[in-house]
Amino acid sequence: MSLPGKRINMRKLNIVSKEALEPMECGLEAHGLFSLSGGLASRWGGLASRFFILLLLCFLLVGGCVKKSSQSSASEKPDVGEREAGRADSESKEVSQPSAKAKAKPIAPLSEMEGVKVLVLEGDAQKRGRLQGTLLKEEIRRIVKKYVYGFLYSHMGGRSIVRVVAESAEEFISEEMKTEMKAMAEAAGVSYKDILVLNAHVDSLSSACSTVGVTAKATSAKPLLARNLDWPAPPDLNGLAVFVVVRTPGKKSYANYTYPGFLGVLTGLNSKGVAVSMNVSASKDAARLCTPTPLILRDALQKAKTAQEFLDELKTKRRCSGFIITALDARSGAGVIEYTASKTSIRKPVHEVLASTNHFLSSTMKKLQMGSTKNSRARLKVLRNAATFMEGTPLGLDDLKGALNKAPVFNSRTLMSVIVSPAEGWFDLWQRGDEASSFRRIQAKKLLSGEVPVIDALPMSKDSLKDLD
């Protein structure tokens, strides 16, 4: 740019260097930033020119300072911005961190899963008893009428005799279990004495159950426990089996495939991955003043962390008669306890397999055996042949299912077949009277852990719960 009639000699402008300007604040007056050469200053006629030049330079320098300031601010801003962004990112990451896993949708205490009736009980004994008695009222009444009166009383010496046997064991049943029985009987509208008989009669029953357990080494994957429950029961029990999960404060949760009204364990798994099953073995060493075996198993299962702890707990109990109890845990701890009222013997897996039917195998217990063992031996042979483990030929789930389905292991008295995975927490279930011929799988792990909340249903009626999912 030039003034009218005169060109500015920019070389004569003694402008402060860029380096000197940069650290200065833009708040300084313009004249402190530069000076004119003496030639221009001595001429009055150049006042206008000098004034214009001053204005121009002031404009240029102030503009440059403003630009420099904005650039400086811009250059500083990213530094601050990076820190702020870093903090913001950090904060946003904290905010966006996956929150605690959302709880599963609550389920009704009585529901159906994979075609299996599932009952989840929690709370104190009174509440659990009332809940089962309310939700399974019709089924409990049917079992009392058809099984307790129609079978037990008529086949085991009459009502008075059977009740006397049950009442003699009552003293050795915990107050918690008796409270649960009474609450259930009241809610279902049946006699407490009949419920007591239902829970105390198994030690006097002659049955033909078969069990096989295999370790993780045998399957090259996870341990498995498989069993058939064979009772001389009338067809009135067909289709009535229910999968029960019990979550009691201060104790380990457990799942049990059983029948309405039964509080003891027939085939169970607890929250620590301990799976158990029971087989009757007739023995001449029996006692009347004792705790019924299914209730013993329940109590031990609510305490044990391992299969060995479970077996050791059974040694301390006041037992009624001969039984063979198999226990297998998620870490492949495994064993069988053979016991009578006064004797016990524990055996470990043979070639990674535990097979049991209804006769003792240990030398100590064989002496206490009573009755014929012919059918029991035939079933044991089938189990061993079907579940033979050899290195390089791991056993699979189909091998165990095949063992349970072969005669005479599977027979006219087989009420249910159950396979349990202690490590993965599932049950494969079949019961007589089921329309499906195949096993139905129930994933019990989350039910046992308490991850799945249960709707507090009391004092709701069964009809009120039909629409609850």
Image (cartoon, rainbow, N blue to C red):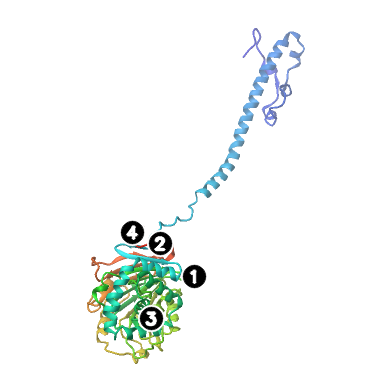
Q: Earlier in the sequence, mark 1 or mark 2?
A: 1
Element carrying mark 2: loop
User: Circle 4 sits on which residue?
Assistant: 466
Task: From the viewer's side, name the closer residue of 228 and 178.
Answer: 178
105 on left or right of 432: right
Visible in this render: residue 204?
A: no
Which-is-in-front pick, marks 3 and 2?
A: 2
Q: Earlier in the sequence, mark 4 or mark 3?
A: 3
Q: Which mark is residue 430?
A: none
Q: Earlier in the sequence, mark 3 or mark 2?
A: 3
Q: Which mark is residue 457?
A: 2
Which-is-in-front pick, marks 1 and 2?
A: 2
Which-is-in-front pick, marks 1 and 4?
A: 4
Q: Position of residue 318 (x, y in %)?
A: 43, 85
Which-is-in-front pick, marks 4 and 3?
A: 4
Q: Amino acid at mark 3?
A: Thr
- What is the C-alpha distance between the residues marked 4 and 3? 35 Å
User: Circle 3 sits on which residue?
Assistant: 293
